[in-house]
Image (tube, rainbow, N blue to C red):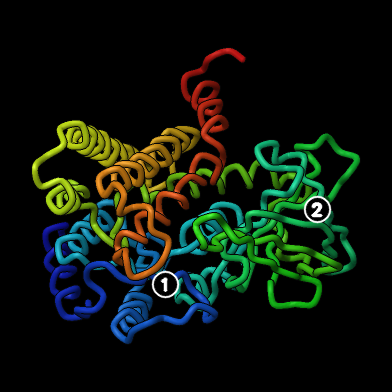
């Protein structure tokens, strides 16, 4: 029987032979599909090599494109990837959200049709949850799906659908029974985005980026056998999917990403913009670093305590709340360090890094409401983790 030490040596050798130089360090992490080109050959080769080995979704069963690793083996893989600064070969909502949800709730047919295409990076997914009048109160959603033979016909609108303009498929919460109590008449459907009746419009943000979209359904169609779970029981499945979104097992494990966090992400900026020192800024930088390290250690402890690599339950809201606040704090400290140089939008008077910091500071403001507002996360923590009364 192979020991963990033997497995580590095997992984280390494989990574050394198969991870290209261009897939190490900062750079692109593909999210699947073909609508967003992979920018360089090394990133493309890294994705394909990992997909063949099952390392895009290491703990998924081999029958669905994974490597069938245990939790201990998976953590070793992540450690060895971090040791050579290897980026994740594949990200996105396929591997992080709908894939784990289908493993838990999907039929054999759904798993066979969708999971291998996610694992190979063939398709890109988006999430159809929020609506103009159903954000934090998501159960008020009104997008309708009517059963019609072997299909559902969908009409309505979704908003804040991240990446919908680049997605091939959507997992979508819809109302299948308008007469049932609002939490009980909801179903989760999978639908092809490349069909008549689906219209996507990107939403321009103050940062100049367009992460979010409006999505309109006008007699769009989903297959009857792409209903996940039972009709009218989508609310439970949809909530479980949000736990994967807030802190999937890869996120909790601190998996390889576009960059491994520096010991202190402000050191270079402080040296360049505050060479004589600014004790207030330096204290803020140290405080941030201590909180971020505590956050990462808590994540890894949670993974060690999890059962069979399963995403934890309501406590994932703790990580989402902390992550949102840390990301905003990092952007704010960076902006304060560079001072007036952080007011540039474009032009020769500002470096590319300064412009990026400015736009990042604007963009990260959305984190207080993205993936469930901070207030919603605190309510979940109070009720379902701490057991406080309503």
The answer to the question of whether label 1 and label 2 lie on touching residues, with beta carbons closer than 8 A, is no
Res. 284 image quadrant: top left
Q: Nearer the viewer, residue 104 or 260?
A: 260
Q: Residue furthest top?
A: 389
Residue at screen point 24% across, 79% down: 22
Please state the horizontal and vertical placement of residue 136, each as a whole percent of the image. Answer: 65, 37
| SS for callout 1 | loop
Numbered circles on residues, count: 2
Task: Return the residue at label 2.
Answer: 143
Residue 63 visible in this rendered orientation of the protein = no
Please state the horizontal and vertical placement of residue 262, each as a whole percent of the image. Answer: 19, 52
Q: Nearer the viewer, residue 388 or 116?
A: 388
Residue at screen point 33% across, 70% down: 348
* Residue 127 in the image: above or below residue 138: below
**1 or 2: tag closer to the N-terminus:** 1
Residue at screen point 76% across, 69% down: 223
Q: Is residue 189 left or right of residue 364?
A: right
For label 1, the crowd category at 10 Å Cα-Cα, with few meaning under 14, some 14 to 19 and many 20 or more, is many
Res. 347 image quadrant: bottom left
| SS for callout 2 | loop
Q: Is residue 217 left or right of residue 74?
A: right
Task: Return the residue at label 1.
Answer: 30
* Real-space CA distance between mark 1 and mark 2, rounded to the nearest whole angstrom: 30 Å
């Amino acid at each position: 029987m192979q020991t963990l030490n033997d497995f580590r040596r095997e992984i280390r050798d494989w990574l050394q032979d198969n991870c290209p130089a261009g897939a190490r360090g900062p750079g692109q992490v593909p999210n699947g599909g073909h609508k967003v080109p992979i920018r360089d050959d090394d990133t493309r080769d890294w994705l394909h090599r990992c997909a063949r080995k099952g390392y895009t979704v290491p703990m998924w069963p081999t029958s669905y494109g994974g490597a069938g690793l245990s939790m201990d083996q998976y953590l070793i893989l992540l450690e060895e990837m971090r040791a050579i600064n290897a980026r994740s070969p594949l990200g996105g909502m396929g591997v992080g959200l709908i894939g784990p949800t289908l493993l838990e709730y999907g039929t054999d047919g759904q798993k066979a049709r969708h999971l291998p295409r996610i694992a190979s990076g063939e398709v890109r997914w988006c999430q159809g949850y929020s609506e103009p009048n159903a954000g934090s109160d998501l159960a008020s959603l009104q997008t309708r799906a009517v059963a019609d033979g072997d299909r559902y016909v969908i009409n309505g609108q979704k908003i804040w659908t991240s990446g919908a303009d680049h997605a091939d498929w959507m997992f979508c919460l819809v109302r299948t029974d308008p007469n049932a109590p609002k939490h009980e008449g909801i179903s989760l459907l999978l639908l092809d985005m490349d069909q008549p009746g689906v219209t996507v419009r990107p939403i321009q943000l103050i940062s100049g980026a367009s992460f979010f979209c409006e999505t309109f359904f006008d007699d769009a169609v989903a297959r009857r056998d792409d209903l996940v779970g039972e009709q009218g029981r989508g609310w439970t499945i949809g909530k479980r999917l949000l736990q994967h979104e807030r802190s999937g097992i890869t996120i909790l494990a601190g998996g390889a990403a576009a960059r491994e966090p520096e010991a202190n992400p402000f050191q270079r900026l402080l040296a360049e913009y505050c060479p004589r020192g600014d004790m207030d800024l330096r204290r803020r930088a140290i405080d941030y670093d201590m909180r971020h390290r505590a956050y990462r250690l808590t994540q890894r402890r949670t993974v060690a305590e999890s059962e069979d690599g399963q995403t934890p339950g309501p406590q994932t809201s703790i990580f989402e709340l902390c992550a949102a606040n840390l990301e905003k704090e990092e952007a704010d400290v960076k902006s304060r360090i560079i001072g007036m140089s952080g007011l540039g939008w474009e032009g020769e008077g500002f470096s590319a890094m300064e412009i990026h910091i400015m736009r990042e500071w604007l963009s990260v403001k959305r984190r207080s409401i993205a993936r469930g507002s901070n207030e919603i996360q605190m309510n979940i923590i109070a009720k379902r983790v701490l057991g406080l009364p309503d």
